[in-house]
Image (cartoon, grey):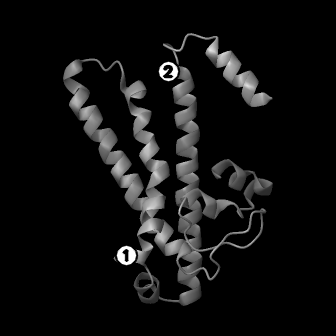
Amino acid sequence: LATFVVVCLLSMGDLQKTQKLTVVIMCFKFLAIFLFIVVSARRAFERYQKLGDSAPLLESMPMWEISAFPAVFGNTVFMFCQHHMLPSMVAPVSPQAKIPLVIFASFCTMVLLVAVINFTALLAWDGEALDTCSAKPGGHFCRIQPMYNLNFAPLSWAGGLAGIFIV
């Protein structure tokens, strides 16, 4: 019912002037990206403390194993969607001569975020023994899932709301 009400209100509005809505959605997406990085970095640090050395941690990363490609590819799906928001965020750019610089900076930011998320994901989740994650907050974590956000379902931060937000 709530989805119907939101869609109904949006369909009655002027869709040419959705920049404010786009900014709100982009803020929520960047919040999710920030949570991806923070949670994964924290879990990678916990693995590092458990192993006591970075060598076994780095050796366990499935960097060039063809069987690990779906997991690495799944990590970039959420990030790939970010480029669809960029045209509405950078239009209109004034002066027009700065457009290539703005697009280049946006592209570099996305590449950097994809690299950081992939690296922290491989460090954080590769050491898990289970193939599927718990669906309830506070449950067990698992190996990297084909859709990376599914790794965060057991996250119990803020009473489980952080995990629900990301998933």
The amino acid pointed to by label 1 is: Ile
Left or right side of 152 for 114: left
Q: Position of residue 45 (x, y in %)?
A: 55, 75
Which residue is at a point 59% across and 86% down the rendered structure image? Answer: 50
Q: Position of residue 58 (x, y in %)?
A: 41, 82
Q: Nearer the viewer, residue 63 or 35?
A: 63
Q: Which mark lies nearer to you, 2 or 1?
A: 1
Q: Nearer the viewer, residue 61 or 99?
A: 61
Q: Position of residue 134 (x, y in %)?
A: 73, 68
The numbered dot on residue 66 is 1
Left or right side of 5 for 26: left
The quadrant where residue 156 appears: bottom right
Secondary structure at badge 2 equals helix
The quadrant where residue 39 appears: bottom right
Asked if residue 56 is positioned above or below residue 160 in the image, the reply reads below
Q: Nearer the viewer, residue 75 or 42?
A: 75
Asked if residue 71 is positioned above or below residue 89 in the image, the reply reads below
Asked if the residue at tag 1 contacts the one at tag 2, i.e. Cβ–Cβ closer than 8 Å, the answer is no
The quadrant where residue 4 appears: top right
- Indicate which disc, 2 or 1, sits on the residue closer to the N terminus: 2
Left or right side of 67 for 23: right
Which residue is at a point 41% across and 88% down the rendered structure image? Answer: 55
Q: Position of residue 35 (x, y in %)?
A: 58, 54
For label 1, the crowd category at 10 Å Cα-Cα, with few meaning under 14, some 14 to 19 and many 20 or more, is few
For label 2, the crowd category at 10 Å Cα-Cα, with few meaning under 14, some 14 to 19 and many 20 or more, is some
Which residue is at a point 40% across and 86% down the rendered structure image? Answer: 59
The amino acid pointed to by label 2 is: Gln
Using the numbered discs, state the Cα–Cα distance from disc 2 to disc 1 in whole angstroms: 41 Å
The numbered dot on residue 19 is 2
Residue at the farthest left position:
97
Asked if residue 7 is positioned above or below residue 29 in the image, the reply reads above
Left or right side of 4 for 69: left
